[in-house]
Image (cartoon, rainbow, N blue to C red):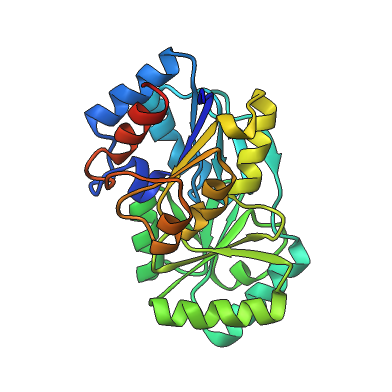
Amino acid sequence: MAIKLIEIDLDDTLLDNRQQLSPRTLAVLQQAMRNGVAVTIATGRMFQSALPFATELGIKLPLITYNGALIRQGDNGETIFHRPIETALAQELADLFRRRNWYLQKYVDDRLYVAELDENARFYADYAKVEAIPLGDSFFHMNEAPTKMLSMGEPAELAAISTELDSRFGGRLYLASSKKRYLEMVDARVNKGQALDFMAGRLGSLQHEVMAIGDSMNDLDMIQYAGIGVAMGNANPTVRAAADFVTLGNSEDGVAAAVEKFALS
């Protein structure tokens, strides 16, 4: 089967453990694009955080960001699709997190907002290379619908939070984790699989002509959707089990190996 569209996760997939694109991966993906294969990114990150890597690759197609809640053109920033969390639901979440003293950050208009610049906020801003904007008490007043909300903590704490959110808001939220210490919340109607289906339709690619590569639970939907779903060697065991193929790890040019096998052979 001929692959026409490749969607690739960023963290622990396209990027190595130094948060960089390796020369081999860069060369292989650019060769695929020269051969007419559409290549783009599907990430839980903000658009502004994903854009430098898309620019390095030369991607001009829309980027799937915020786990599918925002799809924005890579070359001019035009918004193609946006489905934020409804304001009323976001307010319920903010009230709950404040009462329980759980960490929370929100994303509005591709900006990161926090209540205060604590250790979690500083860590995230440094990792994603974005500015965290502190709002104080006004952070908890949801005047605008956020694209995504995110909590950070130890895995056991996040598992307990996730269970409570499922109980309270089941069917109204999509919960995902791109890293062990992240719990990400978006509108229930979006995920990377839905976004990949949207992109395939927009680009005229059939499902069996689509390849998706990822490592974390927020990649599971797109790996299951794709004609060829590829899990990284370092992927979550559930993601590995769902994939059609398991490639090498993210610091072993696993993306390059998979693209060479399925799109350049």
- Location of residue 203 in the rendering, given as x and y in whole percent from the top left corner: 64, 24
State the residue at coordinates (39%, 55%): 125
Which of the 4 image quadrants contains residue 184? bottom right
Residue at x-position 71% and y-position 71%: 91
Front-most of 30 and 206?
206
Name the spot of residue 163 as percent of width and height, x first: 58, 81
Q: Is residue 73 visible?
A: no
The residue that appears at 39% across and 34% down in the rendered structure is 53
| Count of labels in the image | 0
Residue at x 42% of width, y 25% of height: 263
Query: Is residue 206 shown left or right of residue 119?
Result: right
Report whether 136 appears left or right of 157: right
Q: Quadrant of the C terminus?
A: top left
Up-down: is 231 above or below 34?
Answer: below
Q: Would you identify the image quadrant in which residue 216 lies? A: bottom left
Q: Compared to 148, does 231 lie above or below? A: above
Image height of 79 relative to 19, above or below: above
